Image (cartoon, rainbow, N blue to C red):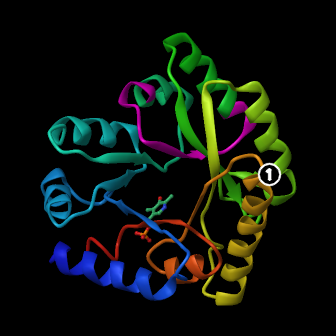
Amino acid sequence: MNVKKNLEDVLSKIQKAKSNSQNITLVAVSKTVDSETIKLMYKAGQMDFGENRVQVLKPKTQELENLNINWHFIGRLQTNKINQLIALSPTLWHSCDSLERAKEYDKRLCVQQKIQDTLLQINSANEDEKQGVSVQKAVETYLTIKETCPNLNLKGVMSIGAFTDDIKVIQQSFEATYKIYEQLQKQGATICSMGMSKDYELAIQCGSNMVRVGSSLFQ
Ligand SMILES: *Cc1c(COP(=O)(O)O)cnc(C)c1O
């Protein structure tokens, strides 16, 4: 694995896909690699990393505590892991997937007097197996969380592209998420997190400003 070359390749593809006015944050999803590999990627210049399991994120943050890494949490969060995640203070929690989960998290943040930057996850293709709020309820849920969860600092939306090989359908799911993001910009939203290894260029063309790339960087 040549992480430096992989990083250069992905960054140049991002550069080609984006418009001049777009600023894209690359989150390197490191869930399949160990801390040594993350360190190599960090030395190549990458500072934002994403993990999807609290019990894996925790030892990695400890092993790499000397590095100035921004840790993103992107996975499904079980209620019994919330306090552990709060203790790790991730840079951004991408996967707040319901009002109930938001309230659970907010309640515990209040006790600890902490604030958490957060994205609302949208199930943009309304797929049964996927987490997130529906396209129809997204704006309303976002506003309700803003009103009722003072310790969650909502900064935008996150979505996983439709699970299909049909580019048109994937594009429609990104466009649906972007439309919601546009409406929420009036509410101060600044982050639209969408795009993974197989579709990040398409996501950028649909307006994403944060891509979460794993396998292309760590192959
Ligand atoms: C694993 C994962 C990614 C990265 O996926 P790749 O296809 O490996 O780039 C992005 N987002 C989430 C939520 C993930 O779980």
Q: Is residue 209 magenta?
A: no
Given residues 44 and 56, the one toward you in this image is 44
Given residues 197 and 5, the one toward you in this image is 5
Which residue, as the protein is rendered here, is positioned at the far front? 21
Asked which quadrant contains residue 134, the reply is: bottom right
Q: Position of residue 29 (x, y in %)?
A: 37, 60
Q: Would residue 38 be found to the left or right of residue 108 on screen?
A: left
Q: Position of residue 191 (x, y in %)?
A: 59, 56
- What residue appears at the point 61 percent right and 35 percent down from the top-left corner? 153
Q: Position of residue 140 (x, y in %)?
A: 85, 45
Asked which quadrant contains residue 86, the reply is: top left
Given residues 86 and 114, the one toward you in this image is 114
Q: Disc 1 marks which residue?
A: 138
Q: Position of residue 172 (x, y in %)?
A: 74, 79
- What residue appears at the point 81 percent right and 59 percent down from the top-left corner? 135
- What residue appears at the point 19 percent right and 37 percent down from the top-left corner? 65
Q: Would residue 55 be found to the left or right of residue 130 on screen?
A: left
Q: Would residue 166 be found to the left or right of residue 53 on screen?
A: right
Image quarter hosting the N terminus: bottom left
Amino acid type assigned to the residue bearing label 1 in the image: Ala
Q: Is residue 157 above or below residue 207?
A: above
The magenta stretch is: 86-101
